[in-house]
Image (tube, grey):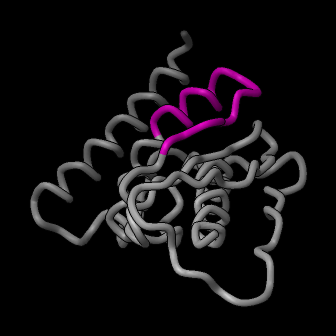
């Protein structure tokens, strides 16, 4: 592994450590902090696509008890992102990652580091409106879009 890659990975791990330390020290909730893991490279292709819009019409009550709703598959330049959101009534109780970017080793490593942060942010915020993890911008955006699709479709 080159020195440049080791330095990048060390910076990424240091950023995660700072986020964890700030959260443990009673700082702002992590979903309100600016994460600074790695510089974001400019995109080489189109940004993430939007999931299917939610259906229009009347709303229904959420199912009673725990239920899981798959989010849409969001294509990014580095691979697809998809989650499954577990609800108990309207409360989000878990977010399970079904797909993450897999185009290259760097994308895989960034997704492995970013998805636990994103999961915790969604659980804390009870929303798909969470900050982007720097260095994993497309993964973050795709994750949030997939979560939002599941939220929009959680009422049947």
Q: Position of residue 36 (x, y in %)?
A: 44, 54
Give the farthest residue toward the bottom.
58
The quadrant where residue 140 appears: bottom right
Decide which of 127, 20 is in the foreground and name it: 127
The quadrant where residue 52 appears: bottom right
Does residue 98 belong to the magenta stretch?
A: yes
Q: Is residue 28 above or below residue 45?
A: below
Residue located 80% across and 85% down the image: 56
Decide which of 89, 33 is in the foreground and name it: 89
> Would you say 42 lies left or right of 71 here?
right
Give the farthest residue toward the front.
64
Does residue 102 belong to the magenta stretch?
A: yes
Magenta region: 96-113
Quarter of the rendering occupied by the C terminus: bottom right
> Would you say 55 lies left or right of 116 here?
right
Q: Position of residue 68 (x, y in %)?
A: 53, 51
Q: Is residue 20 above or below residue 31?
A: above
Q: Is residue 48 above or below residue 15?
A: below
Decide which of 89, 85 is in the foreground and name it: 89
Q: Position of residue 11 (x, y in %)?
A: 40, 37
């Amino acid at each position: 592994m080159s020195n440049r890659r080791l330095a990048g990975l060390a910076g990424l791990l240091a950023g995660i450590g700072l986020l964890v330390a700030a959260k443990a020290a009673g700082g702002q909730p992590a979903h309100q902090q600016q994460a600074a893991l790695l510089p974001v490279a400019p995109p080489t292709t189109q940004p993430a696509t939007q999931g299917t819009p939610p259906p229009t019409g009347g709303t229904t009550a959420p199912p009673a008890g725990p239920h899981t709703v798959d989010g849409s598959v969001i294509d990014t330049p580095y691979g697809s992102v998809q989650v499954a959101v577990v609800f108990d009534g309207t409360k989000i109780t878990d977010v399970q990652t079904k797909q993450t970017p897999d185009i290259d080793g760097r994308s895989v490593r960034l997704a492995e580091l970013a998805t636990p942060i994103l999961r915790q942010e969604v659980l804390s915020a009870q929303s798909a409106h969470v900050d982007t993890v720097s260095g994993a911008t497309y993964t973050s955006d795709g994750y949030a879009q997939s979560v939002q699709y599941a939220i929009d479709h959680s009422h049947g």
